[in-house]
Amino acid sequence: MPRAILKKLKSLYHLIFNYSINILFGSPSESLIVIGITGTKGKTSTVYTLYQTLVKLGLKVGLTSSVYSSNGIELSKNKIRNSMPGRGQIHRLMREAMNNGANVFIVEVTSEGLVQNRHRGIHFDSVIITNLYPEHLEAHGGFENYKKAKGLLFQSFEKSQSKRVDSKVITPLSWVNQDDEHQEYYRGLTKKQVYSTGKSKQSTLQMLVIKSDQDGLDFGYQDNNSKQKYQVTTPVLGEFMGYNLLFVIGIAKWLGYDYKSINKVLNNINDIPGRMNKVSTKPTIFVDYAHIPEALEKVYQTINTSFKSKNSKTIAILGSCGGGRDTWKRSPMGKVAGQMNDYVIITDEDPYDENPQSIIDEVFSGVLEAGKIENQNAWRITSRREAFQKAIDLAQKEDIIIITGKGSETSIMRRNGFKENWNDTEEILKLLK
């Protein structure tokens, strides 16, 4: 049977299954305030930061994301490597969260999940798209299809009506990134109210001066409806996180909290697992999930501007996933790493059924294009553990090692679906000992 037909049948299966399971569990999303967050970069960080913020503000919150899930009481690690689970698992978790007294449920929404109708039957009250960059192009058959896939969330949201939760009327509201070139497309998919964040003066919440250093972020923002200005200090690392935090602030305000209370909570939030995590010093080591060129650039930029001193060198460790996933990005990722770091080590990541060395060679071609010289300031090391050891051997106390691609994941995907137990943070710390 042709692959396209199989894909359509799979989507139809999920469509029928999710509507059915929603009815079976009593339409739990009708009794919760449901927030859907999508985008190419930042969705996981926004989901987890929003979760922390709302819990600290006193709400019971359910959650499904690539890193965590929550039933409204207990936060559990996601070990299935699926950000947006199918077969009605979201509806089941929403029902459990509702039974546990949750007020809010947050869903990390993926393009694949949307195409496969995993969002069907969910009554979203607010949706966010953080940004849009090329990703999953092979899976969707090009960038335009990928863009449209993300738009399915807004099309679903367009059908949402106001509902009453805990005696409070919830009016639907969507959010876009005013600085993203595709924001007009998503605005056009709904006639409901759309707010925005960004540095642009047209933003509802406008980013003002932002400072990023080793202690975190310090930034000002303005509510352009009231023209009031506010200041936030938070331990979260990376200027790019400012955009995500503005979405969090906006949602919390929509839920009825004042800016002063929200800003106070943001002073005390925790690191997002696998996102700009500083796991060691002397040498300083960061672990991050960045796996597309634009995300790598943001990570390296943060390191170079906020952490790198005159005497320190940066050592980048990266690879790229296999299985035919986004093969276009391999060389560009290597090029970004080569341009923005002193040393580069290309290694294994998630090869699936592909030859790991072939993937490494494709990424390394970009490193060479950036002007690096093999075995002088750039290396191809197939074993991820040996690559980590090479970086440790290279590093002086003042240097910085940046490990990207896997973040908080707990396995490497091998041939025939085999999962090799692996966590970047645990493995690099073992070698340091």
Image (spheres, rainbow, N blue to C red):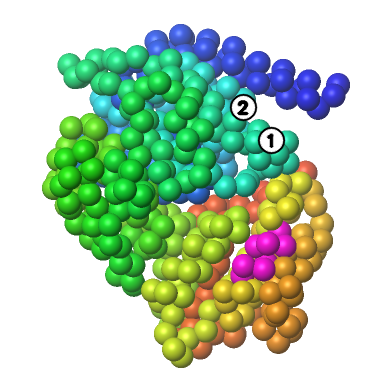
Give the residue type at disc 2.
Answer: Val
Query: Is-magenta flag for residue 336?
Result: yes
Residue found 24% across the figure and 32% down from its top? 254
Residue at the farthest front position: 201
Query: Can I make out residue 25 in this image?
Result: yes
Q: Is residue 372 magenta?
A: no
Give neighbour class at mark 1: few <14, some 14-19, many 20+ (Cα, 10 Å).
Answer: some
Residue at image position (71%, 20%) is: 8
**Quadrant housing residue 197:** top left
Q: Which of the labelled discs sits on residue 318, or is there none? A: none
Q: Position of residue 153 (x, y in %)?
A: 49, 27
Q: Does residue 78 appear in this view? A: no
In the image, residue 323 sits, relative to residue 289, either above or below, namely above
Q: Please tell me whether mark 2 sits on a helix, a strand or a loop.
A: helix
Magenta stretch: give its range. Answer: 330-337
* Contact (Cβ within 8 Å) of mark 1 with mark 2: yes
Report whether 206 appears left or right of 377. Answer: left
Q: Which residue is mark 1?
A: 140
Give the residue furthest to the bottom. 311
Which residue is at 73% across, 73% downward? Answer: 369
Q: Is residue 367 left or right of residue 70?
A: right
CA–CA distance in space, label 1 to label 2: 9 Å
Q: Helix or strand or loop: what does disc 1 sit on?
A: helix
Residue that mark 2 sits on: 115
